[in-house]
Amino acid sequence: MVVVAELRDGRLVEPVREAIGVARSIGGAGATVIGVYVGPPASEGVGEFSRAGLDRVVAVEGEPFARTTSSARARTVAELLRELAPRVVLLAGTSEGRDLAGRLAVEWEAGVATNVTAVEPLAPGPIQLTRPIFGGRATQGLELPGERAVLALRPHTFPPAAASADAAPVERRAPTLPQVPVGAPTMTGFTASATGRGPDLAEASIVVSGGRGVKTPENFAIVEALAESLGAAVGASRAVTDAGWRPSSLQVGQTGKSVSPQLYIAIGISGAIQHLVGMVSSRVIVAINSDAQAPIFKVADYGIAGDLFQLVPALTAEVRRVRGR
Ligand SMILES: Cc1cc2nc3c(=O)[nH]c(=O)nc-3n(C[C@H](O)[C@H](O)[C@H](O)COP(=O)(O)OP(=O)(O)OC[C@H]3O[C@@H](n4cnc5c(N)ncnc54)[C@H](O)[C@@H]3O)c2cc1C
């Protein structure tokens, strides 16, 4: 079993720990779980990876990886896989992980599935998986035939592996393949979206979203303040983004982003089906709406029927008090 590391700002992204947990649980007691890191030099991040519950780490570090697209990483990871010969490779299902998963499957000639929410313990025969489809309104059972598979797991779906007291041994290797193939596009950098504050919306473990119920673009600050107090990402309904109150990169739903955080707080959002498909697989949904009949309450685990202008600032103040902010 191999788990591929993903670092951001030099730190291990949390869903990689979930992938390690899945590798442990599906592989059984005796399974060896090897971590693979391919990327720019990152001694701190690789150190963190080595303490995340792995048996062994293989790291291929090279400065040019910071400038390449995922194809160069995929080719190098595939080269390692040919040697390590695992049956299953697990990645965090972040946008980067999903991108790498597809390329890796081609390079390594393996089956691939993304957005995976359950994996059965490995046994002879096809690998049994589950994933949501149609925006979370149905669940698809999949059998992945073949000798090997690449799986990108939906973030925040699985418990993370317990960190190990001792670091796993790290074997460092020099890149053997050209990291920037001739004629390949070169990555010049990342630019944060206009909303660059807080965690990434699609990967955040808490999302606080606001809808037309906030009434004006200025009032949307109420939603942002609660998000900030919780360390959450900010989302919005299409009513908000269409009105230009906030950029479309914040939109959650059918024509926006799909999110599956641990906690989704919908404020002044009615719960139209096009919004629900983007957030209904969130683990816990809290809705605040003055209309007790609003459809959002049908999917909410906790609902507060009341005026957001009273409730949300009070909630923010309480969160700040409890968290000592
Ligand atoms: C093809 C298509 C694609 C779409 N894609 C998306 C999408 O990706 N994402 C998306 O969100 N929508 C999408 N929509 C739009 C969707 O149908 C809804 O129009 C939209 O989600 C409504 O946004 P809203 O809930 O913010 O506004 P509304 O439906 O107007 O709801 C506002 C809510 O605020 C509540 N409210 C008002 N005042 C207060 C108060 N003081 N306190 C508390 N609550 C209050 C009201 O009771 C109401 O429930 C799409 C539509 C189509 C046709």
Image (cartoon, helix red, strand yellow):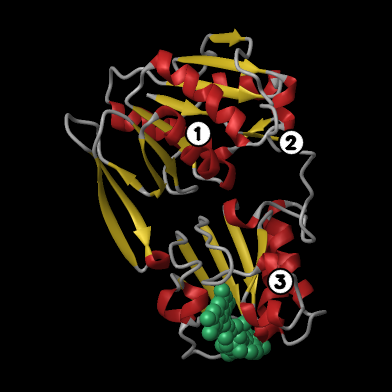
Q: Looking at the image, which residue is at 60% across and 35% down? A: 70
Precedes in sequence: disc 3 or disc 2? 2
Which numbered dot is residue 186? Answer: 2
* In the rendered image, the vertical position of residue 46 relative to residue 101, given as above or below: above
Q: Which residue is mark 1?
A: 17
- Where residue 85 appears, as percent x and y from the top left, is 36, 18
Depth order, front residue of 203/323: 203
From the viewer's perspective, is the residue at label 1 or at label 3 nearer?
Answer: 1
Q: Looking at the image, which residue is at 46% across and 28% down? A: 3
Depth order, front residue of 307/174: 174
**Amino acid identity at mark 3:** Val
Local packing at callout 1 (Cα closer than 10 Å; few below 14, some 14-19, many 20+) is many
Secondary structure beneath label 1:
helix
Q: Which quarter of the rendering shows the N terminus?
A: top left
Secondary structure beneath label 3:
helix
246 relative position to 162: left or right: right
Precedes in sequence: disc 1 or disc 3? 1
Q: CA distance from mark 1 to mark 3?
A: 30 Å
Q: Which residue is mark 3?
A: 223
Residue 270 in view here? no
- Where residue 303 appears, as percent x and y from the top left, is 49, 77
175 relative position to 53: left or right: right
* In the rendered image, the vertical position of residue 128 relative to residue 232, given as above or below: above
Residue 142 in view here? yes
Local packing at callout 3 (Cα closer than 10 Å; few below 14, some 14-19, many 20+) is many
- CB atoms at circles 1 and 3 under 8 Å apart? no
